[in-house]
Amino acid sequence: MFTDILQQTPNWVWGVLAALIAMGFKQTVMRRRSLRSATALPVVMAILSFYGLASAFSRQPLALVAWATGVVAVVTLCQGFRVWGEVQWLEAERSVLMPGSWLPLVLMLGLFCIKFGVSVVRATYPGLALDDGIAGFAGFVYGAFSGAFLARALAVWRAVRQALPRDTAY
């Protein structure tokens, strides 16, 4: 069965996986990025996560509630533990110094795996798309990934905001 799943998977899916791996490996080294570039990848990944949920469970409102719960929970945890806390704004260069981390690669591969898994389950057992438990679980997991990515974008904006001079004249 597993071999059948791999053989019936469209070739473009493996191209997406290769692109995610390449993007993830780029995140493992410290580098300077523009503000737009530093926030674009996390936001795009969060949007893709939401799209994965919406395309699979469009008739399940519980999935959307679970997604929002996952986002809020993981953003809160990431901020509380300062998961992305080493991001720095370099005012002189007007760029963001992003520390190298394996976490973005892990998150990208995790999101790919959940999307792949949900697609396989829906193709194998189409009725499960209407199951509240499956929709809620998948929604929460998709939301957790979105929350981790959005927490990174928020960390970038927080670093920029903290580095800007404060205007004390009102």
Image (cartoon, rainbow, N blue to C red):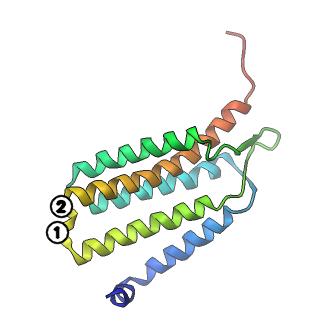
Mark number displayed over residue 152: none
Q: How crowded is mark 2: few (under 14 residues within 10 Å), some or many (20 or more)?
A: some
- Identify which residue is drawn at 72% across, 53% down: 99
From the image, tell me which residue sits under label 2.
130
- Identify which residue is drawn at 39% across, 82% down: 10
Q: How far apart are marks 2 and 1 (CA)?
A: 6 Å
- At mark 1, the secondary structure is helix
From the image, tell me which residue sits under label 1.
127
Amino acid marked by disc 1: Gly
Farthest residue, direction front:
81
Quadrant of res 159: top right
Please tell me whether residue 89 is drawn above or below residue 60 in the rendered image. above
Which image quarter is the C terminus in? top right
Amino acid marked by disc 2: Leu
Position of residue 133 measured from the top left corner of the image (x, y, whole percent): 23, 57
Position of residue 88 measured from the top left corner of the image (x, y, whole percent): 73, 43
Quadrant of res 151: top right
- At mark 2, the secondary structure is helix
Left or right: 70 in relation to 88: left
Mark yes or no: residue 58 visible: no
Q: Are marks 2 and 1 in contact (CB under 8 Å)?
A: yes
Please tell me whether residue 168 is drawn above or below residue 19 in the rendered image. above
Farthest residue, direction right:
92
